[in-house]
Image: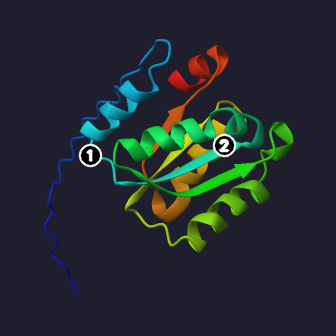
Amino acid sequence: MSLKATEVHVTLRREIDSSYPILVGSDILAEGIERLRALNLPRTAVIVSDDVVFGLYGEKLRSVLEAAGFQVAVEAVFPAGEASKTRATKAGIEDRLLEARIGRDAWIAALGGGVVGDMAGFTAATYLRGIPFVQFPTTLLAMVDSSV
């Protein structure tokens, strides 16, 4: 028995622009939030931070987000430091998202740098196969780390 196959050529072109803006300045949180509104992010936000940074800037970020029309549905805060870069911390963040019934109609705001950016970014990339993620670094080192 002889089969006669027909070959079909499929051409796939992939053009990806990985460009993104970086805002640099002093006391520019409100301006940055206004730019986020223009990106049509979902109106539901999740703040992920460590206990030190959240204690310093958490309420300010929440109030600026809410003033811009975002609803902060979850604040997932974990202990500061490299020791928190664990699967258990990621699971804790995800548990908070699941408890609040966060879906793909939300985005994650990483408040801080280093471990916070890593944990929030990895969670955003894997939760429900990915939800939007924005970094809010609070130190010069975190700003440089977050920008690349």
In this rendering, the answer to whether 61 lies above or below 47 is above
Are discs 2 and 1 less than 8 Å apart at CB? no
* Quarter holding residue 80: top right
User: Closest to the observer: 15 or 132?
Assistant: 132
Indicate the colouring scheme: rainbow
Q: Position of residue 106 (x, y in %)?
A: 42, 57
34 relative to 136 in the view: left or right:
left
* Quarter holding residue 64: top left
Q: Position of residue 38 (x, y in %)?
A: 25, 37
Q: Amino acid at mark 2?
A: Ser
Sequence-first disc among 2 and 1: 1
56 relative to 123 in the view: left or right:
right
Please tell me the numbered disc located at residue 40.
1
Secondary structure found at label 2: strand
Q: Position of residue 52 (x, y in %)?
A: 77, 36
User: Closest to the observer: 81 or 121?
Assistant: 81
Q: Residue at x 42, y 47 (%)?
A: 66
Q: Position of residue 19 (x, y in %)?
A: 34, 25
Q: Residue at x 41, y 18 (%)?
A: 23
137 relative to 7 in the view: left or right:
right
Q: Residue at x 50, y 73 (%)?
A: 101
User: Closest to the observer: 102 or 119?
Assistant: 102
Q: Residue at x 61, y 54 (%)?
A: 75
Q: Amino acid at mark 1?
A: Asn
Instruction: Identify the residue under disc 2.
Output: 49
